[in-house]
Image (cartoon, helix red, strand yellow):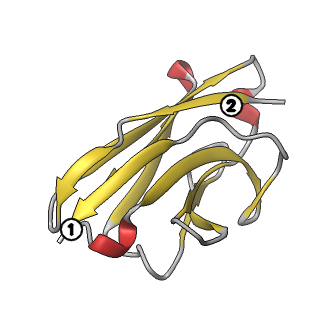
Amino acid sequence: QVQVAESGGGLVQAGGSLRLTCAGSGRTFSRYGMGWFRQAPGKERVFVASITWTGGSTTYADSVLGRFTISRDNAKNTVYLQMNSLKAEDTAVYYCNAVTGTSAAFGSWGQGTQVTVSS
């Protein structure tokens, strides 16, 4: 199982940018597709973006397509989420996890990182 720690969240105005970082541990990190999920207050956690273990293919939720970019550096056991043109509706706690398709592969989650977008 891959253990992760998310960071990089904060308060930003609408239209601004943030880059989230997911630091993974374990020698098998590079073998997993990785993804970002988010949970807004009072709502379920939902898929945001994923990247294959090679980094050669990415998938995005329709709501973030064209604004967010996922990437990874396997040498650093790290996955990134570059978020541009942020909207108030992007406000949520963001989590990363290994993925199978667009679903989380593991049931355990990190603490997440809070992103708040002011309008």
Cα distance, mark 2 to mark 1?
29 Å
Type of residue at label 2? Answer: Ser
Q: Is residue 60 above or below residue 30?
A: below
| Residue 43 in the figure: left or right of residue 90 | right
> Quadrant of the image for the N terminus?
top right
Q: Which secondary structure, mark 1?
A: loop
Q: Nearer the viewer, residue 86 or 55?
A: 86
Sequence order check, earlier mark of 2 and 1: 2
Q: Position of residue 13 (x, y in %)?
A: 14, 60
Nearest the eye: 22 or 40: 40
Residue 95 sits above or below residue 22 on the image:
below
- Is residue 81 visible in the rendered structure shown here? no
- Callout 2 secondary element: helix
Q: Position of residue 85 (x, y in %)?
A: 21, 68
Question: In this figure, which residue is indicated by the disc labeled 1?
Answer: 85
Image label count: 2
Please identify the residue farthest to the bottom as the structure is shown. Answer: 62
- Which image quadrant: the C terminus? bottom left
For residue 77, which numbered disc appears in the image?
Answer: none
Residue at (60%, 45%) from the top-left corner? 96
Q: Nearer the viewer, mark 2 or mark 1?
A: 1
Amino acid at circle 1: Ser
Q: Is residue 104 visible?
A: yes
Residue 90 spot, x, y in % from top left: 38, 67
Q: Residue at x 71, y 66 (%)?
A: 102
Say left or right for 41 vs 101.
Answer: left
Q: Is residue 79 left or right of residue 29?
A: left
Please give the residue where the numbered disc 2 appears in the rendered image: 30
Task: Check disc 1: other Cα within 10 Å, few if <14, some if 14-19, many if 20+.
Answer: some
